[in-house]
Image: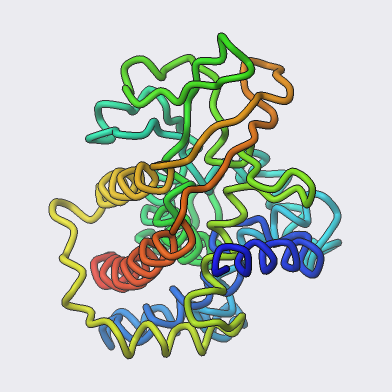
Amino acid sequence: MRIIRWLLISFLIGLIFPDAAFSWGGEGHRTVAKLASWYVSPEALKKVNELLAASGERDLPSISTWADDLRLAARDEGPLRGNMEALAFNQDFPTNADWHFVNLPLNAESYESVKNFGSKDDVVHAITCCITVLESLNPLPNMMTRIQALKFLVHLVGDIHQPLHCGCGFYNLTDPKAPQLISNPKIAFGQPSDRGGNDLFYDLKNNQELHAFWDTVVVMAIADTPDYKGLAAYLERRHQMSEVPLTPGSYKGWAERWAIDSVKCATQAYAGIRFGHLDSFADQRPIRITITLPTGYAENSKRIAVQQLFAASVHLAQLLDSIQWP
């Protein structure tokens, strides 16, 4: 009965929030930003607040969805529709929609071993770029502004912790009636992918895709609320910052490790899924593959989502602490 309830929630979200198929949805991103604002050091928070105030922005949660709003503005939709800054940004950085993800194969052990799946526009490189801009006192040529970099950084650290924004299914489609998920990264390269679950549909009648399930449905189910303040309080009561170990190595390389940690979670997210038939195929990638979710999938997904949302908030705070603010 619990999975049926979740599928109903998924359907209703699609009706009420047709633009909700973005990473973690607004609730998840604002929750990560809210928790990070509690965990960041006073020194770093002062620098963040100075940048926010100078740009007329309120706080970290209020800027956490700007990067997704840009994508809507590019379609002449959403809260930034017609906004001059958004129009200029999308014109100057036409590939910014690609900054939100990287399609790495399941079972990848390191970013270095699968870096041929990434690109200069993937989420790993975008986070590194944001750090560079934030550490520069003067504007850099052909780069975003510092406040834009902060807006993207807050958002992208959330994105990189969403398992299906990093882990992706690749397939052998020799038999369209029985797509075969490829688990070996060495074999996956060059094969068609499901674009992080965007092409996997567990409810064809209501057009429900696996990626959107992870973006919004599972997040709302954690604390049974669409309110980010309630979700932040829920996570803060049940978890300690010390539960999330500091990422080793230089902070400028942390994004690579976070991406692989998300791939490991994505491998769990794909476990037990039964793949049905391939509905159509074009441009060397599947368009619609029907799937059946295993028993207990909803609860297992919620556990992973809690882990990743909380880790994202701690990692964002740690990264803001580590940045060399000018």
Percent of width and height locating residue 45: 35, 83
At horizontal 37% and vertical 66% (from top left) the residue drawn is: 303
At horizontal 60% and vertical 30% (from top left) the residue drawn is: 276
Above or below residue 119? Residue 40 is: below
Above or below residue 275? Residue 20 is: below
- The image quarter containing residue 85 is bottom right
At horizontal 33% and vertical 23% (from top left) the residue drawn is: 185
Viewer-nearest residue: 216 or 52:
216
Relative placement, left or right, of 291 versus 281 is left
At horizontal 52% and vertical 69% (from top left) the residue drawn is: 219
Viewer-nearest residue: 320 or 244:
244
Total number of numbered discs in the rendering: 0
Percent of width and height locating residue 283: 68, 16
Residue at the front extreme of this rendering? 1
Above or below residue 88? Residue 300 is: below
Q: Quadrant of the N terminus?
A: bottom right
Q: Quadrant of the C terminus?
A: bottom left
- The image quarter containing residue 112 is top left
Q: How is the image coloured?
A: rainbow
Viewer-nearest residue: 238 or 314:
238
Percent of width and height locating residue 17: 76, 67
Percent of width and height locating residue 266: 39, 46
Above or below residue 275? Residue 226 is: below
Residue at the top extreme of this rendering? 174
Relative placement, left or right, of 180 versus 321 is right
- The image quarter containing residue 226 is bottom right
